[in-house]
Image (tube, grey):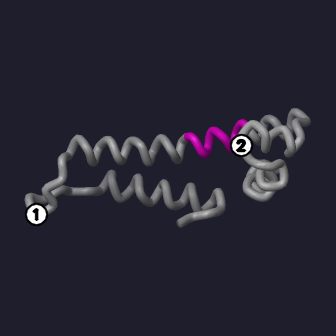
Amino acid sequence: MPRSVDEILEHADDLAARFENYEPSEADELNSDIVAQLRSAVQERSDAERHIIDAIRAARHGGVSWAAIGTFIGTSGEAARQRYGDKVA
């Protein structure tokens, strides 16, 4: 399972591409509405992670501490810094 932000984004993009390029066959027996819903959910997750990175970047440039950012995203400040620090510089 991906752990870093880069791995999460790469994984989400890979899954979105796989769903986008998916061509169902009778043997697959998948409901195309469900596949479309999954594809949409994966893309939304990827978009949300990018949005979080943008918001954290703005917060850091606005002087918000890592401790405060950690509180907002449900983690410690150090965990937030480790996960996003190199993405928002």
Give the amino acid type for the residue marked by disc 1 in the picture. Answer: Ala
- Residue 52 part of the magenta-drawn span: yes
Percent x, y for residue 34?
26, 44
Q: Which residue is mark 1?
A: 27
Q: Are marks 1 and 2 in contact (CB under 8 Å)?
A: no
In the image, which residues are magenta? Answer: 48-55
Dot 2: few (<14), some (14–19), or many (≥20) neighbours within 10 Å?
A: few
Q: Amino acid at mark 2?
A: Gly
Q: How many numbered discs, if any?
A: 2
Earlier residue among tags 1 and 2: 1
Residue 14, disc: none
Whether residue 63 sits left or right of residue 53 in the image: it is: right
Give 14 or 27, whichever is nearer the viewer: 27
Give whichever of 12, 30 is nearer the camera: 30
Disc 2 target residue? 74
x%, y% of residue 28?
15, 61
Give the secondary structure at mark 1: loop
| Relative side of 58 to 23, left or right | right
Label the magenta part by its dominant secondary structure.
Answer: helix
Residue 74 percent location from the top left of the image = 71, 43
76 left or right of 50 in image: right
